[in-house]
Amino acid sequence: LQGLGSNTPTGVPYTEDEIMAIVRGGKQRGHIPGVGRVLPKQRTVIPPPSQGTHLADIDWLKKREKLLTKEVNMFK
């Protein structure tokens, strides 16, 4: 499946109908690489969790925001 590449304007490799056709055909069950988990009976696609945001990054950003807010308030 991964070798087929993207064929949609959004860059998603498969449309929902194509995913469901693959699932119904029994070629893939439970997970399609690049798409996520597929629940065939419910015709639902569950996207994989985002890997772009890490808790450490969120904590660092919160601390940085707090520090910058203090600095801005000093000049008021």
Image (cartoon, rainbow, N blue to C red):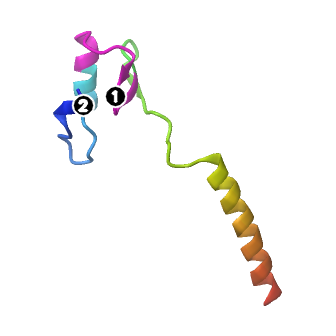
Asked if the residues shown at circle 2 and circle 1 are in contact, with their CB atoms under 8 angstroms apart, the answer is yes
Q: Is residue 42 magenta?
A: no
Q: Of 32 and 17, which appears nearest the observer?
A: 32
Q: Give whichever of discs 2 and 1 has the lower sequence position.
A: 2
Residue 68, placed above or below residue 47: below
Could you tell me how far apart the alpha carbons at marks 2 and 1 are, in whole angstroms? 7 Å
Q: Is residue 10 above or below residue 34?
A: below
What residue do we see at 19% from left, 32% from top? Answer: 3
User: Where is residue 38, by image quadrant?
Assistant: top left
Q: Residues within 10 Å of mark 2 (few under 14, many from 20)?
A: few
Instruction: Tell me: residue 9, above or below residue 33.
Output: below
Return the residue at label 1. Answer: 33
Count of number-bearing discs: 2
Q: Residue at x 25, y 13 (%)?
A: 27
Q: Position of residue 70 (x, y in %)?
A: 80, 77
- Residue interval drawn in magenta: 21-37
In the picture, measured across the screen, residue 76 lies left or right of residue 33, that is: right
- At horizontal 20% and vertical 42% (from top left) the residue drawn is 8
- Percent position of residue 75, x then y: 78, 90
Q: Which residue is mark 2?
A: 2
Tell me the element at label 2.
helix
Along the line of sight, the residue nearer the viewer: 15 or 70: 70
Left or right, 70 with respect to 11, comes to right
Badge 1 element: loop
Look at label 2 and name its amino acid. Answer: Gln
